[in-house]
Amino acid sequence: MKPGAVLSLLTTLLLLFGAGLPSLVAQSSEIFMIPVEGEGTKYWPRWRGPSGQGVVSNEGYPDSWSTSQNVKWRTPVPGQGHSSPIIWDQQIFITTSQQSGRRVSILSYDRNSGEHLWETQIPEGPIEATHPKNTQASSTLVTDGTLVYGSFGSRGLVAVDLEGHLIWHTDTGTLENYHGSAGSPLLYQDLLITYQDHRQDSFIGAYDKRTGENIWQTGRSGSVGWGSPVAVRVGDHNEIIVSSQRQVTAYNPTDGSELWHCDGNLFEVIPTPVVGQGLIFCASGRAGPTLAIRPGGRGDVTDTHVAWSTPRGSPFVPSPLVYGDYLYTVNDMSSVITCFEASTGTVMWQERLGSPTREGFSASPIGVDDKVFVTSDEGLTFVLRAGADFELIGINDIGARTLSSPALVDQHWYIRTEHGLVAIGY
């Protein structure tokens, strides 16, 4: 074929198919947190909501409140527990620990009135030692609208129906974690996935959500950790991501085999990973590094897939927030929030939230209505304008100690305080 004919053929092919090439390329390299689908998108059915990242897409939520302003109802909650509320339809579900951890329960409340609907006690089991900021009921529940699932450390995994009837209970062994258990389980298709890093026989496991039967289990080397797994879509396949002691690891959700791992975390890790700009962001505890990792590799990707990292300043407890083009992290060891350009790691701004307090933040930030909401343990919510410039809009005082992250449904905030539940709305 003559050169001119070749050029003409290439030009024709580009005209015919070129418009589709960018979308095909984008689709093949697309990376995102697998969201809740179907009816669950209307509610708050899991840790950090339908997005899995604390991002709310609809608008109209109050950005100011106090002990009385915009408070729709307030109801007491017995015992102690720092699990975040989840919501399906008109029900709120939380966990609580009473009688020094001997009685652990799932509680349901009506989200319109705050009325207590029912309590289901978890089968008895070993009572784990806990940190002052942890309880026997710190893991957030998850629901698919049929059953509500919970992870209770050495007491195992449970599923109850929406009326509180115990459907199944699975023993996962006695755990020896020096601050107790806390990670929240993940619903992925028909599987309930959790990992437990403790002194011996650490593992990640997947269980049939209908029966509690163990489908696969993979041993892990970590000896301590309190984080939660996430499911991420990477091009043409899915990965389960765990950020824990010394390492970030990706697993095949079908059989639990390891896909890749990346070193760089510190010893103690709590924050849940978030996804944006083609990267997975993992915050390493106690003001350690934050890693921005390109997923989809194989084997040890430490030297090949870290797009950028910070040497220090990472959160110890609160998970990061990706909102728009920016990544927000709250260093709870010094009460400092940092805004990064997510794609490059460039620091856009860094500011202190209130007085410097060691371990003064536990709740993870929320992104809604182009604002970032960050709540301290003392119940102060700092309202910031999202974006490349720092702007403090206001500070809301709910009047109660708050270690849990909120749930947002139908223009209402549902906040669990140390001893109660509060609904905020216009």
Image: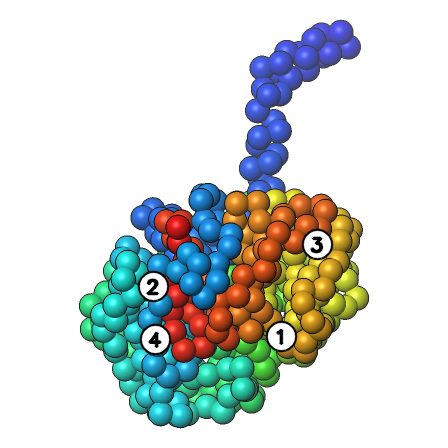
Where's residue 79, x and y in %? 37, 83
Number of residue marks: 4
Mark 4 lies on a secondary structure that is strand
Instruction: Residue under label 1, please give it.
Output: 360
Mark 3 lies on a secondary structure that is strand
Question: Disc 3 residue type?
Answer: Cys
Q: Residue 76 carries which label?
A: 4
Instruction: Residue under label 2, please give it.
Output: 73
Sooner in the amino-acid sequence: mark 1 or mark 3 = 3
Sooner in the amino-acid sequence: mark 1 or mark 4 = 4
Viewer-nearest residue: 86 or 344: 86
Instruction: Residue under label 3, please give it.
Output: 339
Q: Nearer the viewer, mark 1 or mark 3?
A: 1
In the image, residue 105 sits, relative to residue 142, either above or below, namely below
The residues tagged by marks 1 and 3 sit, at their Cα atoms, a distance apart of: 19 Å
Question: Disc 1 residue type?
Answer: Gly
Mark 2 lies on a secondary structure that is strand
The residues tagged by marks 3 and 2 sit, at their Cα atoms, a distance apart of: 34 Å
Q: Do the residues labelled 2 and 1 touch (CB within 8 Å)?
A: no
Question: Disc 2 residue type?
Answer: Trp
Q: Give neighbour class at mark 1: few <14, some 14-19, many 20+ (Cα, 10 Å).
A: many
Looking at the image, can residue 114 be seen?
yes
Where's residue 336, x and y in %? 71, 65
